[in-house]
Amino acid sequence: MEFVRIEKGLGPGGRIAVVRFDRGDGINALSPQALRELTEAARSFEDDSETSVVVLTGGQRSFSAGFDLRDAEGRSRSTMDLGSLRRHLKLGPRLTRAWHDMDQITIGAIEGFCVGGGVALAVALDFRIMGRDAHLRVPEIGLGMNMSWQSIPRMLHLIGPARTKQAVILADQRISAQEAHEWGLVEEVTEPGKSFDAALALAAKIAAQPPLSVAMTKLTINRLAHALDDLASHMDLDQFALASLTEDHKEGVAAFMAKRKPRFRGR
């Protein structure tokens, strides 16, 4: 894989693995190719009975800037018919579902910034640890889109309705690591550059527990907590496809590319 590296056999009994997503550009945007590789990385653990915990980390400067609006394949969405667009839009929810469904406990180590699709990926994990100077942001609405990848139900479980609306609707708002911790979006805040070390320390504690009991407990909690999510979360793909056909979306992307404020008209 070009953007993703997997290391296994770490920690107590060799039961910890690390997945490093780092494009080496300080931005770590989620291009379609990156989405496919991260999905493949999650699925590579499906038959892995030796790994109990997986730590997902980005670069030192960023966890991820979200979907890559400048990627050639990603930009081709603007010319796709609705059927092709819906098929292409499945890349994101396929990624977050793959990580959400893993038998292993998953921990995100977040440095720098975590934006848009990066947030959607982070909330699909079991735990999140952030460096103190890192921040989260959900800019989709500011681009004339909606937040998708089945992330709204996951955020709702973590932080409740009002905070989810605040995080998603106020698209320009940066959520600091301290705010994210107070809201319940992340479980631990560390000194800058130390989130990965803290994630490994937590992983070591989990890896020392009986693997089968841990896996079954995770499955039970997730099934109970997310039992009704599919009733609503399936709609976000079609909402995204519909929003992408609006003039506001075209204006939002054009403004982003030109580094100016968008002028939305509700059409």
Image (cartoon, rainbow, N blue to C red):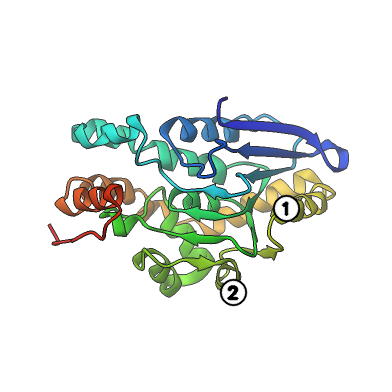
Residue 93 image offset from top left, x and y in percent: 42, 42
Residue matched to label 1: 199
Q: Can residue 121 be seen in this snapshot?
A: yes
Q: Is residue 153 left or right of residue 110?
A: left
Vertical side of 188 occupied by 238: above or below: above
Q: Is residue 242 left or right of residue 8?
A: left
Q: SS class of the residue under badge 2?
A: helix
- Which quarter of the rendered picture does the C terminus lie within? bottom left
- Which quarter of the rendered picture does the N terminus lie within? top right
Which residue occupies the extreme right position in the image? 13
Q: Are marks 1 and 2 in contact (CB under 8 Å)?
A: no
Front position in the image: 218 or 181 = 181
Residue 205 image offset from top left, x and y in percent: 82, 54
Vertical side of 248 occupied by 72: above or below: above
Residue 50, which numbered label?
A: none
Going 64% across and 45% down the picture, which residue do you hit? Answer: 57
Residue matched to label 2: 182
